[in-house]
């Protein structure tokens, strides 16, 4: 049980406090309700570029990292399609340093041309390092626009292409800040061996005078139901083929989400999963296979990723793949199998909540989704899933017309 | 309120280290346990003298990964199924020095999981079909990894630095076609059945559970670890691995150095941190934050049982390769010729000590800290010494150590791309 308190400032900043007496560190986690899905289709990659700019100095403090390091702390941040999250870990006696720094960059950035220019280059190198200069690195750049036609999930957080990053202007940076970076659009989670009254006092001191701005109402075009099998084949300079399948499913926490998550486990999580046992161990058609869900807020994807064995054909693999998928639709799975995967979910959850930083991030993300207390109740949702529920949802999503397929073929070098 | 003034900070002066319970089994195997935890998770590591130093890299890796591949009376599917049913996970980590085989799960099931793991480990029969399936999958993964400039640079760097010792051994794709089952069986017999070194347990198991794990440990025996003296001398080289289509060039620069048993290790860690050991380091400030040549650059001291090596590592836009090497050289020269300011040094000191505090946070972290000194025959007093030396180092010493250990002529310089 992760216990926490919740309070809100007049300017709309929501604060979660988790007391953890076992740690000498304190965490300040700031989640902004903005991700790549909030970008304009003409300026993708912006939320992530912006995350970099948040380290380029704020209105009253020229350097973010230095003072935090001086206080014995460290920090980092990440951007997803849904959110942008910043965290600082400091020795608890230096908590105030983190609050000072974080509140100042919520108040306003320095907006220097130099910072924009450098971070554009850094992000372009990141684009190359992670997406262009790795085998299969562009998989998601190709898959997303195939699976999503309308929703902004059709581009990756890094952006559609390098040009969008190159062309970002200071005007746009300021505009993005004003729209998305303000108390009402953030959730602050503070954790450590602290007292609630002290936390309230310090948060009021550093964040209380940050002006509130109106929270932008999100009006994203929702992805319509997919009614066709989508497939695309691309050739790349890679050593071997990779087949990727995605089935549209419920967004995180929505009806069907937990069923889909468990379906992906039955299919392809670990060495006793159905696809692994059949396609890899028995038939040796693949050298690797796994299934998982994307925990996105809006319409998500249940993914299956396949590395075919040398000599195995796509037709052979697909025939067996669909047999396994159809089996889930026709027959109820045994209770024992469902219990097995729920047990794994419980273990994973217990380990993922170790440490004060992980707990803080989870509390903030759950609060944004619905309620921070999901951290304590989420397992119940998994336990409520029935074998009938699995069958029903499998029938809903594991359909060819709900499936997107990307085939990456290894270019043959004939020299 | 004046937001330009930083709040007062206070320095970490003391870290409260907690030693695990230590017991020695009849077979001399040590058991370390951290049982004062507040959640339901338990992790049990069985650590064997089965690293790649004791054979070839590929045999060590395959033997470890095949431990759950079945025995005369249980198939791999049955083993995986019984672990999964208990919500358990296994871990296999093979380094040059050791093999760590882990049983991971919730408290109520951990003893059953560990029993299954040990039973599988002891009775594995290296079924040829299982060997072949693993080979096919590993060969594919390796072919993919070899496409990465970072892999290419790392391989060239290590094989050059350690050309006279097994630390420089590389696995090649063809090696996968020459595996003999007998080698795996023999290695398993010598280094697993007779090679258990210690067991570490993190999690709130009760006495009964602890006894059960100890009984499992007693099923192995422990041979003396044989120490082999290798020749760590090397000649610095310049190496380029060409990859025409690459968009970025991976760079590795460094030299053979030492591990924490060396008297200069702690103070050199400070020099390393200033140069490339944290986000605000000089290399990051210059090459990422000022020039924008890279997404990231860093340096470190990798510790091996008998030695260690210093490295600088980055991936930069192809057009920035020479500029980056120049900039690295410049930063090193600066460290050797100008004393670091008191401000910068004080920041780095506070940062390093804050990091030790963070890296000791929680039972698993505390166990990791313990193992990382125990391995070298040291104890927790090492960290007191560490904090003391970090606090004491002067700008003059930083400069002297940079002159002593960071000579460009001593570096092997590798680029791939």
Image: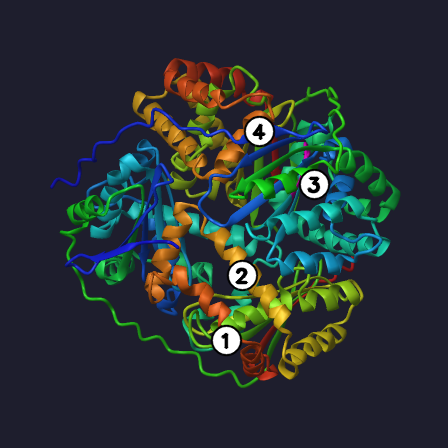
Under circle 3, the secondary element is helix
Of the 4 image quadrants, the one containing the N terminus of chain B is top left
Tell me residue B239's x, y (percent): 65, 33
The label number, if any, that marks residue B13 in the structure image = none
Query: From where the camera sits, is residue B244 visible?
Result: no
The CA distance from mark 3 to mark 4 is 16 Å
Residue at 23 percent across and 47 percent down: it is A196
Q: Nearer the viewer, mark 3 or mark 2?
A: 3
Mark 3 or 4, nearer chain start: 4
The CA distance from mark 1 to mark 2 is 19 Å
Under circle 4, the secondary element is strand
Under circle 2, the secondary element is helix
Residue B201 position by quadrant: top right
The answer to whether the residue labelled 3 contacts the one labelled 2, judged by CB atoms less than 8 Å apart, is no
Please tell me which residue lies in front, A339 or B6: A339
Which residue position holds label 4? B22
Which residue position holds label 3? B216
Respond whether the residues carrying marks 1 and 4 are from the same subunit. no
Task: Answer few, some or many: residues within 10 Å of disc 4's Cα (few below 14, many 20 plus, some between 14 and 19).
Answer: few
Residue at 55 percent across and 71 percent down: it is A302
Respond whether the residues carrying marks 1 and 2 are from the same subunit. yes
């Amino acid at each position: 049980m992760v216990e926490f308190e919740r309070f809100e400032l007049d300017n709309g900043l929501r604060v979660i406090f988790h007391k953890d007496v076992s740690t000498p560190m304190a965490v300040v986690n700031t989640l902004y309700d903005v991700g790549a899905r909030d970008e304009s289709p003409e300026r993708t990659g912006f939320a992530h570029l912006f995350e970099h700019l948040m380290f380029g100095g704020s209105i009253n403090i020229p350097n973010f990292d230095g003072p935090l390091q001086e206080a014995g702390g460290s920090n980092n941040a990440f951007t997803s399609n849904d959110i942008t999250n910043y965290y600082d870990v400091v020795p608890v006696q230096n908590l105030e340093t983190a609050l000072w720094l974080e509140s100042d960059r919520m108040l306003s950035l320095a907006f220097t041309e130099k910072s924009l220019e450098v971070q554009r280059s850094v992000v372009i190198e990141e684009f190359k390092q992670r997406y262009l200069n790795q085998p299969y690195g562009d998989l998601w750049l190709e898959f997303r626009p195939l699976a999503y036609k309308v929703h902004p999930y059709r581009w990756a957080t890094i952006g559609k292409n390098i040009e969008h990053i190159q062309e970002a202007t200071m005007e746009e940076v300021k505009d993005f800040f004003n729209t998305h970076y303000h108390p009402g659009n953030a959730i602050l989670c503070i954790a450590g061996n602290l007292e609630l009254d002290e936390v309230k006092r310090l948060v009021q001191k550093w964040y209380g005078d940050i002006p509130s701005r109106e929270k932008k109402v999100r009006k994203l075009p929702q992805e319509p139901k997919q009614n066709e099998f989508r497939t695309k084949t691309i050739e790349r300079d890679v050593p071997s083929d990779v087949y990727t399948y995605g089935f549209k499913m419920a967004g995180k926490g929505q009806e069907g989400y937990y069923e889909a998550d468990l379906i992906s486990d039955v299919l392809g999580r670990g060495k006793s999963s159905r696809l692994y046992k059949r396609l890899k161990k028995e038939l040796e058609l693949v050298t690797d296979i796994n299934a998982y869900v994307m925990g996105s807020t809006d319409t998500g994807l249940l993914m299956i990723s396949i590395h075919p064995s040398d000599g195995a054909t796509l037709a052979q693999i697909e025939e067996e793949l669909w047999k396994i998928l159809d089996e889930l639709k026709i027959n109820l799975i045994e209770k024992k199998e469902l219990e097995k995967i729920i047990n794994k979910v419980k273990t994973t959850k217990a380990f993922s909540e170790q440490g004060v930083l992980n707990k803080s991030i989870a509390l903030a993300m759950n609060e944004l989704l619905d309620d921070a207390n999901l951290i304590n109740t989420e397992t119940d949702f998994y336990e409520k899933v029935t074998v009938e529920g699995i069958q029903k949802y499998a029938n809903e999503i594991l359909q060819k017309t709900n499936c997107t397929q990307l085939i990456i073929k290894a270019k043959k070098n004939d020299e | 309120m004046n937001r330009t003034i930083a709040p007062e900070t206070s320095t970490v002066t003391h870290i409260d280290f907690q030693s695990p319970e230590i017991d020695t089994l009849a077979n001399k195997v040590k058991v370390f346990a951290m049982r004062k935890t507040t959640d339901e998770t338990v992790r049990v590591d069985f650590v064997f003298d089965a690293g790649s130093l004791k054979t070839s890299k590929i045999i060590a890796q395959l033997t470890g990964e095949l431990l759950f591949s079945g025995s005369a009376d249980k198939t791999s599917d049955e083993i995986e199924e019984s672990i999964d049913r208990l919500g358990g996970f296994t871990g296999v980590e093979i380094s040059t020095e050791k093999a760590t085989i882990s049983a991971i799960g919730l408290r109520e099931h951990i003893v059953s999981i560990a029993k299954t793991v040990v039973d599988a480990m002891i009775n594995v029969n290296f079924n040829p079909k299982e060997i072949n399936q693993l080979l096919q999958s590993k060969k594919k993964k390796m072919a993919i990894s070899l496409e990465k400039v970072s892999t290419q640079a790392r391989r060239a760097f290590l094989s050059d630095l350690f050309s006279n010792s097994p630390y420089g051994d590389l696995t090649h794709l063809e090696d996968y076609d020459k595996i003999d089952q007998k080698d795996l069986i023999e290695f398993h017999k010598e280094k697993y059945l007779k090679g258990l070194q210690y067991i570490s347990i993190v999690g709130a198991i009760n006495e009964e559970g602890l006894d059960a794990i100890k009984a499992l440990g007693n099923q192995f025996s422990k041979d003396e670890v044989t120490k082999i003296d290798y020749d760590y001398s090397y000649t610095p080289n310049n190496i380029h691995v060409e990859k025409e289509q690459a968009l970025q060039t991976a760079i590795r620069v460094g030299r053979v150095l030492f591990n924490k048993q060396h008297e200069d290790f702690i103070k050199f860690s400070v020099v390393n941190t200033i140069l490339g050991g944290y986000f605000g380091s000089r290399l990051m400030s210059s090459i990422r934050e000022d020039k924008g040549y890279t997404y990231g650059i860093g340096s470190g001291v990798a510790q091996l049982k008998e030695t260690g090596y210093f490295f600088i590592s980055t991936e930069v836009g192809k057009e920035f390769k020479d500029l980056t090497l120049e900039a690295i050289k410049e930063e090193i020269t600066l460290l050797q010729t100008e004393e670091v300011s008191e401000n910068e040094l004080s920041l780095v000191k506070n940062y390093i000590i804050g990091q030790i505090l963070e890296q000791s946070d929680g039972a698993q972290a505390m166990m990791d800290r313990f193992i990382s000194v125990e391995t070298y025959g040291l104890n927790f007093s090492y960290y007191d010494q560490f904090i003391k030396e970090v606090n004491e180092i002067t700008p003059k010493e930083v400069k002297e150590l940079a002159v002593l250990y960071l000579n460009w002529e001593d570096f092997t310089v590798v680029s791939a791309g």
